[in-house]
């Protein structure tokens, strides 16, 4: 099973490394405008293979994506000082208009996973290009709030003193400042959060909730301030999404893909829990949110729809 990774910066390279460490796929092709960077990253990760799983990892060109079942799109430009968000979107859209057709020209059957930020809008752009090739939007998946959901579960598990795999909670909406932490549906060990807190003799007060919320919502800012970029978490998330597609695992993940209606906002791309399998997004689940969460999701989806409209208008 072949995987393509387009864009060999921190995120693309770390995703490839995570795939090798977890035995995802059998062949990984790394493609970058800077071929020396792609060569170097592929060689460095290849040297980790004897310590992990036997994958064939190498650099290549777009033609080498032929036969790939999944292609991770991690290419893009960084925001310049003083540059507005819409200006960044316009530059990244120009990159996507150049790169995505080359992916589909060579790997038309691949599920494309978008990692480039702002991921919600860039996934929408990718799906628009895919439509020109007759490819359904369900085969275009943005990493969305997969990482934010992991952050929420990890921070809450630390407070609860329980393994994070037993904490079931979601972050939905935009991958960004307007994202929505779904506290009302959180459960632990098959129990509502409130019941679990009672059993453990814990109190989750407003200040603690606010601290966890900030830890999730502001995580990227904190990490970027300290080390310049985030890549371990998102690289691992991309590896997991890829595995779930290649293995047709039918896992529920908070990824983004174009959706006809989210919280009253039409034709928008933000994250909801979605069933992910071999053909991409198989189903989408609209959660029974409380009134406050529903209003927050409406605002989040509306923000992204506004950016899409502004991009289309420009």
Image (spheres, rainbow, N blue to C red):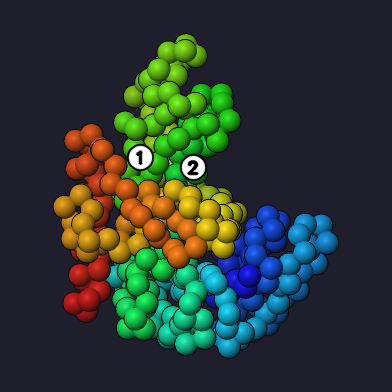
**Is residue 159 left or right of 282 when viewed as pictured?**
right
Instruction: Mark yes or no: residue 91 visible.
Output: no
At horizontal 49% and vertical 32% (from top left) the residue drawn is: 167
At horizontal 35% and vertical 55% (from top left) the residue drawn is: 283
Quadrant assignment, res 162: top right
Q: Residue 139: horizontal and vertical position, in percent?
A: 41, 68
Quadrant assignment, res 91: bottom left
How far apart, in angstroms, are the residues tagged by discs 2 and 1? 11 Å
Q: Is residue 44 above or below residue 296?
A: below
Q: Is residue 109 above or below residue 220?
A: below
Q: Are marks 2 and 1 in contact (CB under 8 Å)?
A: no
Q: Residue 212: horizontal and vertical position, in percent?
A: 43, 34
Element under label 2? helix
Tell me the crowding category of disc 2: few under 14, some 14 to 19, or many 20 or more residues within 10 angstroms, Cα based. Answer: many
Circle 2 residue = 151
Residue sitting nearer the eye, 130 or 15: 130
Q: Which mark is residue 190?
A: none
At horizontal 31% and vertical 31% (from top left) the residue drawn is: 184
Residue sitting nearer the eye, 245 or 300: 245
Circle 1 residue = 181
Q: Residue 304: horizontal and vertical position, in percent?
A: 26, 60
Instruction: Pick the quarter of the image with the N terminus.
Output: bottom right
Q: Earlier in the sequence, mark 2 or mark 1?
A: 2
């Amino acid at each position: 099973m072949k995987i393509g990774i387009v864009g060999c910066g921190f995120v693309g390279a770390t995703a490839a490394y995570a795939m090798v460490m977890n035995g995802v796929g059998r062949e990984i092709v790394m493609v970058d405008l800077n071929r020396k960077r792609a060569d170097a990253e592929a060689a460095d990760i290849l040297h980790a293979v004897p310590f992990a799983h036997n994958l064939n990892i190498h650099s290549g060109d777009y033609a080498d994506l032929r036969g790939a079942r999944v292609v991770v799109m991690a290419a893009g430009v960084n925001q310049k000082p003083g540059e507005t968000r819409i200006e960044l979107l316009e530059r990244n859209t120009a990159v996507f208009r150049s790169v995505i057709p080359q992916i589909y020209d060579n790997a038309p059957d691949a599920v494309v996973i978008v990692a480039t930020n702002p991921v919600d809008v860039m996934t929408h752009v990718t799906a628009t290009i895919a439509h020109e090739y007759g490819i359904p939007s369900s085969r275009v998946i943005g990493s969305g709030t997969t990482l934010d959901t992991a952050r929420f579960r990890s921070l809450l598990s630390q407070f609860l003193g329980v393994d994070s795999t037993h904490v079931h909670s979601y972050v939905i909406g935009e991958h960004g400042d307007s994202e929505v932490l779904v506290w009302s549906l959180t459960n632990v060990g098959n129990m509502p959060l409130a019941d679990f807190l009672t059993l453990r003799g814990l109190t989750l007060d407003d200040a603690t909730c606010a601290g966890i919320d900030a830890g999730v919502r502001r995580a990227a800012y904190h990490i970027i301030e300290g080390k310049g970029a985030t890549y371990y978490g998102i690289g691992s998330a991309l590896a997991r999404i890829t595995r779930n597609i290649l293995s047709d695992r039918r896992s529920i993940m908070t990824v983004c893909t174009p959706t006809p209606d989210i919280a009253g906002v039409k034709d928008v791309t933000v994250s909801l829990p979605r069933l992910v399998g071999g053909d991409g997004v198989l189903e989408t689940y609209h959660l029974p949110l409380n009134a406050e969460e529903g209003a927050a999701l409406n605002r989040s989806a509306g923000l992204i729809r506004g950016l899409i409209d502004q991009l289309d208008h420009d």
